[in-house]
Image (cartoon, grey):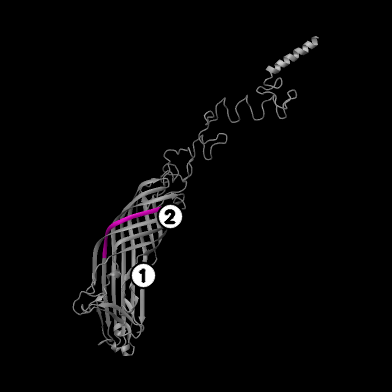
């Protein structure tokens, strides 16, 4: 009976202990923090495979000893982290900071032209600026160290300590506005009566009465200058360019056939103005198509132009990837034309003209030269847009000033009689005493210029460029316009041919291929 009572007492105590003391452990001595026995858990035999309740919780958990791995809530968060408030914006403490950030030392400088990450504040004084360029020079590229502030060249805005000089050379392929010349050489079919040979409008024009000097020509342009400050806000420099001579030549030689003549308008009789021609080589059907004379006509028309300027630039505005500058200065341009027409004949028949011996030679030459000299000031803007190694530069300016125009007209004739002395006079056919001389005048003119240049920088000192330029001159005089085709053949002093100033415009346009350098 006493044994039964003891057994019952032990059972009651066990039941009470099960309800109170074992609420957090499936068996006596179970680890604190464990709840009721899970399914399939046999407390008398130990926990499921892989659990060690007497030694701690499941692998990777330490509920009584501290927070998850990497956190130390009893001692404070790791240096630079605040787990109670969350990590700094953009950081992931369990994975580490974004690439390129060092939160314990501050962010590293991103490379030039990069986009700054969200919530990243660029240090004061290193705000990006556009790369510094000029009318002829470029600024630094890449990540070189600035010699002024120690920052990144192309970002800090300073020079990296190299020479402030810049320059460029360019190869030009330009067209220019041509010019017209009157009909200066003509011909007529064999058998044409002497009085009609080479006479307009029925004669065929061999040279003249069309536009010349408008072909593509090569040239060059050179620019040099310097920056006056490390921030590249002010510069001074010079530029010069030239374009090769545009020239057209005409040469004709005839032994009599085909006919050669130099046309003109005969105004000797004001009441009977007629078209006529000076016969150089021809046959006369009135004498059985006999050769009256043999001869040649030579003509050439040329154009040359070049220019130079001194400039200064001042920065107006700049920001990430661009800059705008004011440009102004002095410019000089020279535009020259020359027209030369010559003829030579040898008399072959006594019927050529009265009192002219066979074998007599007559040579005539006319020269018309023009010069246009522009002196003036100019003002404009340049804008450069930068994207990586590529740049786009736009330039526009207008020059205003004086155009000095000069025309020189001269002529000569040489007549050589067989067995006689040569006779020379200071007149040709179209250049005579009535118009020979030098004439000048000054005209107000304006000269707008626009340009576009695409560049690719190989490094901070060298850039290759390709672009286009257009220049316009409002008032010039041309050689072809100086010719007066009206001739008064009378012996008395006369007023024709006469010289009258005529003005026109002039332009040039073409492609530029170059190289810019800082040196």
Relative placement, left or right, of 19 versus 406 is right
Q: Residue 153 location, x and y as percent? A: 44, 45
Cβ atoms under marks 2 and 1 closer than 8 Å: no
Q: In the rendered image, which quarter is residue 224 located in?
A: bottom left
Q: Residue furthest top?
A: 2
**Residue at image point 51% right, 38% down:** 101
Q: Quadrant of the N terminus?
A: top right
- Report if residue 229 is visible in the image: no
Left or right of 494 in this view: 350: right
Magenta segment's dominant SS is strand
SS at mark 2 in the image: strand
* Among the 4 quarters of the image, the one containing residue 255: bottom left
Judge from the rendering whether residue 511 lies leftward or rightward of residue 293; answer left or right: right
The answer for how far apart the CA atoms under marks 2 and 1 are is 32 Å
Bounds of the magenta segment: 393-405
Q: Is residue 268 magenta?
A: no
Residue with the most extreme right position: 1
- Mark 2 or 1: in front is 2
Give the x, y percent position of residue 317: 37, 46
Q: Residues within 10 Å of mark 1 (few under 14, many from 20)?
A: some
Q: Could you tell me residue 405's position as x and y percent?
A: 26, 64
- The answer to whether residue 306 is above or below residue 272 is above
Using the image, determine if residue 309 lies above or below residue 436.
above
Q: Which residue is mark 2?
A: 454
Question: Which of pointers 2 and 1 lies earlier in the amino acid sequence?
Answer: 1
Q: For mark 1, give the secondary structure.
A: strand
Return the residue nearer the eye: 193 or 412.
Answer: 193
Residue 494 visible at all: yes
Residue 147: x and y, percent?
43, 44
Q: Which residue is mark 1?
A: 247
């Amino acid at each position: 009976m006493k044994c039964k009572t003891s057994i019952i007492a032990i059972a009651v105590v066990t039941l009470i202990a099960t309800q109170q003391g074992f609420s957090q452990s499936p068996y006596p001595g179970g680890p604190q923090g464990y709840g009721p026995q899970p399914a399939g858990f046999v407390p008398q035999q130990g926990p499921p495979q892989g659990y060690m309740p007497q030694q701690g919780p499941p692998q990777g958990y330490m509920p009584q000893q501290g927070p998850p791995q990497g956190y130390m809530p009893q001692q404070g968060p790791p240096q630079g982290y605040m787990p109670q408030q969350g990590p700094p914006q953009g950081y992931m403490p369990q994975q580490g900071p974004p690439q390129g950030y060092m939160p314990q030392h501050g962010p590293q400088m991103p490379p030039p032209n990069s986009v700054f990450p969200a919530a990243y504040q660029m240090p004061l004084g290193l705000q990006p600026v556009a790369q510094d360029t000029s009318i002829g020079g470029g600024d630094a590229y890449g990540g070189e160290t600035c010699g002024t502030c120690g920052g990144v060249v192309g970002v800090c805005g300073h020079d990296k300590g190299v020479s402030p000089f810049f320059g460029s050379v360019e190869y030009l392929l330009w067209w220019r506005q041509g010019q017209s010349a009157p009909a200066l050489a003509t011909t007529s079919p064999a058998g044409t009566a002497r009085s009609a040979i080479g006479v307009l409008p029925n004669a065929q024009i061999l040279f003249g009465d069309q536009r010349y000097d408008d072909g593509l020509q090569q040239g060059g342009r050179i620019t040099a200058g310097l920056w006056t400050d490390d921030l590249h806000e002010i510069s001074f420099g010079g530029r010069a360019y030239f374009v090769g001579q545009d020239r057209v030549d005409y040469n004709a030689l005839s032994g009599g056939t085909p006919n050669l003549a130099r046309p003109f308008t005969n105004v000797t009789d004001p009441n009977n103005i007629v078209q006529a021609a000076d016969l150089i080589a021809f046959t006369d059907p009135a004498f059985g198509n006999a050769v009256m004379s043999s001869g040649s006509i030579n003509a050439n028309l040329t154009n040359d132009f070049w220019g130079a300027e001194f400039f200064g630039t001042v920065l107006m505005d700049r920001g990430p990837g661009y800059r705008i500058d004011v440009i102004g200065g002095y410019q000089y341009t020279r535009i020259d034309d020359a027209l030369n027409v010559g003829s030579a004949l040898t008399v072959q028949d006594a019927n050529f003209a009265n009192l002219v011996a066979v074998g007599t030679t007559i040579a005539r030459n006319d020269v018309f030269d023009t010069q246009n000299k522009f002196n003036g000031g100019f003002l404009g803007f340049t804008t450069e847009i930068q994207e990586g190694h590529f740049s786009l530069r736009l330039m526009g300016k207008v020059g205003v000033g004086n155009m000095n125009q000069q025309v020189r007209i001269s002529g000569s004739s040489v007549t050589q009689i067989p067995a006689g002395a040569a006779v020379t006079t200071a007149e040709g056919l179209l250049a005579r005493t009535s118009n020979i001389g030098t004439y000048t005048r000054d005209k107000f003119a304006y000269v707008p210029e626009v340009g576009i240049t695409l560049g690719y920088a190989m490094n901070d000192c060298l850039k290759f460029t390709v672009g286009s330029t257009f220049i316009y001159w409002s008032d010039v005089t041309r050689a072809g316009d100086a010719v007066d085709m009206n001739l008064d053949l009378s012996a008395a002093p006369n007023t024709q041919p006469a010289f009258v100033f005529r003005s026109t415009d002039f332009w040039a346009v073409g492609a530029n291929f170059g190289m810019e350098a800082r040196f």
